[in-house]
Amino acid sequence: MTNNVTEIEVEALPIEVDSLPIELYKALKIANVVSGGGEAKHAISEGYVAVNGELEQRKRRKLEDGDVIEFNGEFFFIDFQPQVDFTPDFVPPPKEALSVSSPSKASGDKGKKSHDKAKKANGKKAAKKADKGGEGKRVNRDSNTGRRSISF
């Protein structure tokens, strides 16, 4: 018995993805041939979609780079484009190296007024803590999020 395999050359449009594998219904959404995921899943389950020349009814079938999808008389192929990271390799200086400059004499009383306001605000915060009985009590905070810990 011999396999009768015929190759047909067709023009296929690329579906550019930045992560693999990708599910079939998501590829149809990215190709913009369906209006949403529900429509894509319905078309797949009804047998309107073929992958690599074979009818496919699995909505979440994993597609890899180079897989060919046929839908509605059009052909598409998965084109993997890894995401390029354009962030520079910048390392901030240590906190000790950063210096805070004092208000200049040219600003006159403006620097003094803002300093007085900060003192008053800190005084109000201390008074609120004293009312709550929180004076001297250290609040544990998560180092990543800054949120307080919860105790039951």
Image (cartoon, rainbow, N blue to C red):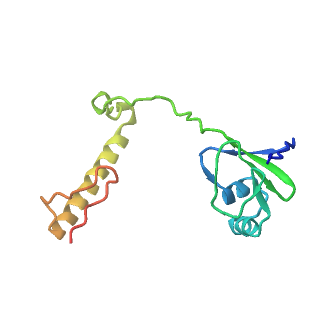
Instruction: Please count the marks in the image.
Output: 0
Image coordinates for residue 87, horizontal then vertical, percent: 52, 34
Residue 89 place in picture, x, y as percent: 47, 28
Instruction: Give the quarter of the image for residue 126.
Output: bottom left
Taking the image as shown, residue 84 lies to the left or right of residue 113, namely: right
Q: Residue at x 27, y 30 (%)?
A: 96
Q: Position of residue 6 (x, y in %)?
A: 85, 44
Q: Is residue 64 left or right of residue 69?
A: left
Q: Which residue shows up at 66% across the image and 63% down it? A: 59
Image quadrant holding the C terminus, namely bottom left
Q: Nearer the viewer, residue 148 or 64?
A: 64
Residue lying farthest to the front in this orientation: 1
Answer above or below: position of 59 versus 70: below
Q: Is residue 101 above or below residue 10?
A: above
Viewer-proximal residue among 76 and 149: 76
The extreme bottom residue here reads 152
Residue found 70% across the figure and 67% down from its top: 41
**Relative horizontal placement of residue 47, taking residue 22 as reference (left or right):** right
x then y, percent, for residue 75: 82, 50
